[in-house]
Image (spheres, rainbow, N blue to C red):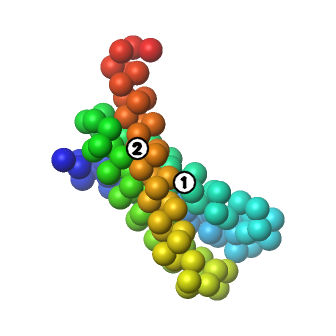
Amino acid sequence: MINIKVLVRATIVGIVLQLVLMGAAHFIPYVAQHVFLFGGMMISATAGYLYGMDTGKGYFTSATGGAVAGRFCALVGVGASVMLKDAAETVIPLFTAICVFTGAVGGLFGQMSANMRKMNL
């Protein structure tokens, strides 16, 4: 079962970081050209990692929660980018799908981190 409280916290962190990235991409051409997609992917993966590390309820639950957190972060980030006219509306499904995947992978690594913390490594 997904822990809603942890999911909201991880998603808020991801949304704030996505908005900072999209603002930077709007005003700094280098960021828009070289960091936009990779940065968005990393932010979604980080949100997934935070969820998985905080809950530690198993790999499936962590991957699912990470995917949900990554999805919401990506939707807000790419939505802001489209509203700023920095990206076309056609990138929304692709960017969101990519960030769902990276959020899920981040959740898996977060679960691995939670397991290591339990073993005191």
Horizontal and vertical percent position of residue 41: 57, 56
Amino acid at dot 2: Gly
How many badges with numbers are in the image?
Answer: 2
Mark 2 or mark 1, which is nearer the start of the sequence?
1
* Secondary-structure class at tag 1: helix
Question: In the rendered structure, are the residues bearing label 1 and label 2 in contact, judged by CB atoms less than 8 Å apart?
Answer: no
In the picture of the structure, the residue carrying the numbered disc 2 is: 107
Residue 103 in view here: yes
- Residue 106 vs 118, above or below: the answer is below
* Secondary-structure class at tag 2: helix
Q: Quadrant of residue 25?
A: bottom right
Horizontal and vertical percent position of residue 67: 39, 55
In the picture of the structure, the residue carrying the numbered disc 1 is: 43
Is label 1 or label 2 in front?
2
Q: Nearer the viewer, residue 112 or 5?
A: 112
Residue 47 in view here: no
Residue, far left: 1
Q: Residue at x 23, y 49 (%)?
A: 2
Horizontal and vertical percent position of residue 51: 37, 44
Amino acid at dot 1: Ile
Q: Quadrant of residue 89?
A: bottom right
- Name the quarter where the C terminus is drawn: top left
